[in-house]
């Protein structure tokens, strides 16, 4: 497409009362937090092999997995260079970069100094996650809710140290680091003491979150799940548990698109949850069969989430992160494809004539609303996206595919 294509598109959208330049300016301010674990199949860099993944699995063995922090950062550098805008990195605790090999209850900010230096040099914000899986003390699929106090204490200390690390990130980068807590705790068959497990999880969380940190440096989030591998009968940290906890304790609530029943709509939950919590965290994924974590497409689910964020004026209260791990395709290309699709969905939402749509709905003109929503799908969104990429100096179309293939060929011989 050419600049004249954008000029024509701008005029077409203008006829609907939409300012495309304003939409592009707004899109450029929305950071998305890429997830480190897509680059190496959730292995991490601790140098140990655990018997349990706590429901964490990556499918496939595509060549080119990052084997160390330098390779992962190189892959991320390439991905960021092909994603318009300025974005963040969501880092798991098991991805520290240090010649030392501390256990998880011993990690300190200094073990992540190379990550912080890299992020500051490249203008990326950092977010963080405790790693409560893939460890011998998670082999029972119980961590913070474990009946053994010694195991609970180990994971509580891990959680405390992760908050300290996240707070240092936030202070150094000048924007709050989101520290998101997810645990795999649950039971394969029906338990008789759900209440006891949930009381233990609540008490453990309370202990982890007891120390105060400046909200400008650290924002705590809690994340639920419907079920996991090996915990099909009961997940201790269910949606109801964490929704109530977030409301009572004033934490962020993380909504993962793969962590609910396939017929549930995350878009529908956003406005409901926002009435009770100040901020939310999104983990954007594509659950083809429940939490199967496919690279996101520009599909109805993603479009609905983006529209609800815009329609409900929730962008300022919602932190957008990504969460999938697909090793059947180029891991680096997966970042680029998925992140750009999230941006495309946001752009389409920003290009909606919201005032016109709301007026039809408030007049109970549901026929007019349906006509509008369907006709708007035919507008030249692609020309506006091309203009955004041009302004941000990133490739599209065949040039993008060529760059992705060239980079993949350069890393394909990694062991």
Image (tube, rainbow, N blue to C red):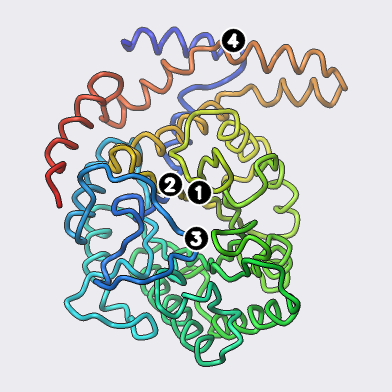
**Side (left or right) of 134 relative to 268:** left
- Judging by the rendered image, the residue that carries numbered circle 4 is 15
**Side (left or right) of 150 relative to 406:** right
In the picture, the disc for residue 31 is 2
In front: label 2 or label 4: 2
Give the answer, above or below, for where 298 lies relative to 203.
above
In front: label 1 or label 3: 3
Residue 139 appears at what percent x and percent y?
47, 75
> Which label's residue is closer to the chain start, 4 or 3?
4
> Which label's residue is closer to the chain start, 1 or 3?
3
Label 1, label 3: how many angstroms apart (C-alpha)? 23 Å
Q: Secondary structure at mark 4?
A: helix
Q: Disc 2, disc 1: CB below 8 Å?
A: yes
> Which label's residue is closer to the chain start, 2 or 1?
2
Disc 4 residue crowd, few under 14, some 14–19, many 20+, Cα 10 Å: few
> Which label's residue is closer to the chain start, 3 or 2?
2
In front: label 2 or label 1: 1
- Judging by the rendered image, the residue that carries numbered circle 3 is 55
Label 2, label 4: how many angstroms apart (C-alpha)? 29 Å
For the point 52% across and 70% down, the residue is: 215
- Judging by the rendered image, the residue that carries numbered circle 1 is 320
Q: Secondary structure at mark 3?
A: loop
**Side (left or right) of 310 relative to 359:** left
């Amino acid at each position: 497409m050419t600049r004249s294509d954008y000029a024509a598109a701008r005029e077409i959208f203008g006829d609907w009362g939409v300012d495309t330049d304003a939409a592009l300016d707004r899109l450029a301010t929305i950071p998305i937090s890429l997830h480190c674990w897509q680059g190496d199949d959730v292995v991490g860099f601790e140098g140990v092999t655990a018997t349990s993944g706590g429901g964490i699995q990556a499918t496939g063995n595509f060549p080119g997995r990052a084997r160390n922090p330098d390779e992962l950062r190189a892959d991320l550098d390439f991905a960021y260079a092909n994603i318009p805008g300025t974005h963040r990195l969501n880092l798991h605790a098991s991805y520290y970069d240090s010649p030392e090999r501390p256990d998880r209850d011993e990690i300190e900010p200094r073990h992540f100094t190379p990550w912080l230096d890299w992020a500051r040099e490249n203008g990326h914000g950092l977010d963080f996650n405790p790693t409560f899986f893939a460890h011998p003390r998670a082999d029972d699929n119980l961590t913070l809710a474990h009946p053994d106090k010694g195991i609970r204490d180990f994971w509580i200390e891990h959680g405390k140290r992760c908050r300290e690390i996240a707070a240092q990130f936030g202070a150094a980068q000048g924007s709050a680091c989101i520290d998101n807590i997810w645990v795999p705790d649950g039971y394969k068959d029906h338990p008789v003491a759900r209440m006891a497990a949930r009381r233990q999880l609540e008490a453990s969380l309370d202990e982890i979150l007891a120390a105060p940190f400046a909200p400008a440096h650290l924002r705590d989030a809690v994340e639920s799940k419907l079920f996991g591998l090996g915990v099909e009968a009961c997940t201790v940290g269910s949606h109801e548990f964490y929704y109530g906890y977030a409301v009572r304790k004033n934490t962020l609530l993380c909504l993962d698109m793969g962590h609910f029943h396939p017929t549930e709509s995350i878009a529908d939950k956003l406005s409901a949850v926002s009435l009770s919590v100040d901020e939310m965290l999104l983990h954007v994924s594509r659950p083809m069969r429940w939490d199967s974590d496919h690279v996101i497409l520009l599909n109805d689910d993603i479009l609905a989430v983006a529209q609800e964020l815009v329609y409900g004026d929730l962008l300022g209260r919602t932190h957008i992160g990504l969460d999938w791990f697909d090793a059947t395709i180029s891991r680096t290309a997966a970042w680029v494809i998925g992140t750009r699709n999230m941006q495309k969905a946001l752009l389409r939402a920003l290009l909606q004539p919201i005032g016109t749509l709301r007026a039809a709905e408030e007049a109970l003109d549901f026929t007019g609303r349906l006509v509008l929503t369907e006709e708007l799908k035919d507008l030249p969104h692609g020309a506006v996206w091309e203009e955004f990429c041009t302004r941000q100096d990133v490739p599209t179309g065949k040039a993008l595919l060529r760059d992705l293939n060239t980079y993949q060929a350069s890393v394909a011989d990694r062991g």
